[in-house]
Image (cartoon, coloured by chain):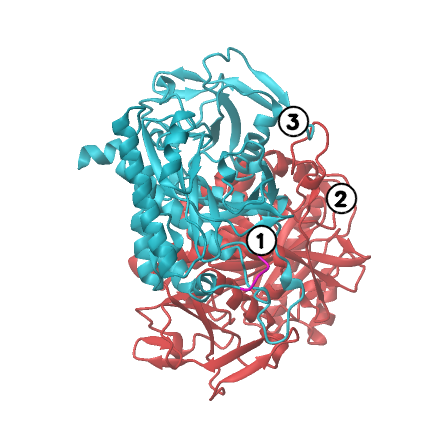
Chain colours: A cyan, B red
Amino acid sequence: MVPHLITALTGPINELEQRMLDAMPAIERWFRLEWMEHTPPFYTSVALRNAGFKLAPVDTSLFPHGWHNLTPEMLPLAVQAAMAAIEKICPEARNLLIIPENHLRGPSDLADVAQLQHIFNLAGLNVRVGSIDPELKKSISYTLPGGESVEVEPALRLRRRVGLKHFDPCTILLNNELTAGAPGILEELYEQYLLPPLQAGWTVRRRSRHFQSYEDVGKRFGKMLGIDHWLIHPISANAEAGSGKKSLDALRAAVDLVLTKVRRKYKEYGIGEKPFVVIKADDAADSAGVALLRDVRELEALAEDARLPRSGHWLVQEGVLTQERMHEAVAEPVVYTMDRYVVGGVYRVHAATDATAVVACSHDARYVPLAFEHSTHLPQPGVRPGASAPNRFYMYGVVARLAMLAASYELEATDPELQELA
Amino acid sequence: MVPHLITALTGPINELEQRMLDAMPAIERWFRLEWMEHTPPFYTSVALRNAGFKLAPVDTSLFPHGWHNLTPEMLPLAVQAAMAAIEKICPEARNLLIIPENHLRGPSDLADVAQLQHIFNLAGLNVRVGSIDPELKKSISYTLPGGESVEVEPALRLRRRVGLKHFDPCTILLNNELTAGAPGILEELYEQYLLPPLQAGWTVRRRSRHFQSYEDVGKRFGKMLGIDHWLIHPISANAEAGSGKKSLDALRAAVDLVLTKVRRKYKEYGIGEKPFVVIKADDAADSAGVALLRDVRELEALAEDARLPRSGHWLVQEGVLTQERMHEAVAEPVVYTMDRYVVGGVYRVHAATDATAVVACSHDARYVPLAFEHSTHLPQPGVRPGASAPNRFYMYGVVARLAMLAASYELEATDPELQELA
């Protein structure tokens, strides 16, 4: 089930969206069966782009931020999902430790941690915030703009457990991208649950692996729904990064490959737009530094100006246009999930009005929460209550959960314990 | 977690309520551990009475009606809970059959069935409504006041399965009190899930057994919280019903016993009210015909006027005053649960203004949905968002879940399969 949130979509429902709305029971059942075999990532936020003719995920975060952007009405959904998750993982849980990002710059960095603390507290846990930033030597109390305060304490390692002074958690919630790699303090915890696991960090994660899993998921889902999986999947290729001619040639080949495939698809579907690709770092949390190009000949200039993302690997990905606008600015829906449930959504809004604008890389993006649709207040003749307006957030919830499922495959593939068994 | 709904409580928080609010994480953990051992009833509605100094359940329905009284905002919570329940019971489910009460008088009897249909449809199931009323020979389409239509089809038995024409459900949701006993059409279904099970019907159920289970639950909960369990429990006694002198003597003894115990408690807590008892049928779905008395001497008159409930057994129960008022009328909170979650609440409002008014037995009661508290919109200095006003619905959610847990014990005690094993 996907909550009925108000999207920026006002146009007619196109074929893809209608197909998903019509197949809702079959889709929900498909997910139910998937979750019998696979464990959902504890929480995610999935950024999507909706071109109208296609809808695809562009970024799946396993350490989702921005929880404070969810509306108060969504909170009970998140709490109920948190309860379901905790019950499965560690029903006897009493204490939960949240580990925020290192290098907190101030209260604004803690608004979403405060919301997470609130959610897990309402789910029935004692929640405290512990930083693994080695520079933090003593507790700091931050006062948020709303007036509430959050205390960040230095996390302590005691034998095989991590905790705080006088606080021994059985579950540790990571809200830290681990960009510098798995810190020693979190390694070899045999008696505590670390959520998500260490391999969700960016020293292990690869965007290319995620999108490969996503393609597998998308193909199977497309087969079930009877659609070409390209309608929900961005074509990708990857290339080893470097500054030499060999690297650039490989990158050029990858860009050419993706553009050619996309051109073929545009032709097949009669789409009159000009394809473009984005080049992303394959292994960096920060999607800043995404390069966009419409022609392989633009590559030389990008390389010369050092505008290619810094990374060991590059991911070249089909650029997905975005149809959605809020007050004419480009808007990218971001869907929040917890356990197997969609618990909310926000729009990431960029000042640009160009459909190709890559919102993810812009630091001046604003976040606009999606409100609940209350159409059930006004039932229409001949129509079921609550169904009087179609849930246009539904397809976002579906594609976000496909990305979440791909992340689940991804975490299984990189699970050191499962690898040992294999 | 209990959604933050606006109650009619405006006075200061008393000791009992404060104790529950303070112990929230411990309470939630206690429930979590209980649900490791016991299966929650699929859904319930629990009517409560709040006397201020005490809060107790007065009726636990295992075939809850009135779902249409839940606000649209609560719907996603119910759907998410339905998903969790279905996933545990029958993840491969595709089709769900709802069995409504027999003898449907018209569209107004179907508003809540339509809401249930909507909830399970959003949870990803194909849902149809099948009646087991032997008088229903062909489908009837009802048009509800809101304009939507519900089709009620005659349920069919085919070997070991129940279904509809061209509809083979794997799960059957009973929303029928089974007052006439377990109908043959639902017996010996070995290959379908019947929710709740047949022993939840009123030929097997006894109010006395429920409140006995509730007392066990209440004692353990009281011990954990460090409170006298009387503060959440109505004292009860039962007596075999009949019209002879022997029956009346037994009933008098039961009334006397309960009144004496309550008087002692009132004295202990310095409560200046006059105790009263209610006499209920021990085994009837309909709580109409509840008799109220303040003095054992009133019993003769009740018996002579044939105002005692008709039943094989009587349950004599401590009457709980109700402090809550909506526009001066007595209001009884009714809490809805699904799986282990509190998914909403309504007030049952009676025109009477007397605190002893027995709302449950009055047919002229109105239902007022409880709205969500949106205090998080206006965070207060120094206070966590969402916690800026205490959740006064919380204690209702706690006591309702204690009654739900008692119902779980009750269903275990009357489970024919478990009895065979014992």
**A130 left or right, relative to B416:** right
Percent coordinates x, y for residue A303 in the rendering = 38, 28
- Magenta region: A5-12
Q: CA distance from mark 3 to mark 1?
A: 29 Å
- Do the residues at discs 2 and 1 belong to one chain? no
Residue displayed at 28% across by 24% down: A244
Q: Is there any visible trace of residue A373 in the rendered image?
A: yes
**10 Å crowding of disc 1: few (<14), some (14-19), many (20+):** many
Task: Examine the rendered structure and indicate whether residue A170 appears above or below residue B83.
Answer: above
Percent coordinates x, y for residue A339 in the rendering = 43, 44
Amino acid type of the residue that numbered disc 1 sits on in the rendered structure: Thr
Task: Examine the rendered structure and indicate whether residue B308 appears above or below residue B219.
Answer: below
**B315 left or right, relative to A32:** right
Which is more N-terminal, label 1 or label 3?
1
Query: What label does residue B271 carry, if any?
Result: 2
Percent coordinates x, y for residue A122 in the rendering = 56, 39
Q: Is there any visible trace of residue B409 in the rendered image?
A: no
Query: What label does residue A7 carry, if any?
Result: 1
SS majority, magenta = loop
Residue displayed at 35% across by 62% down: A227
Q: Chain of mark 2?
A: B
Q: Which residue is mark 3?
A: A144
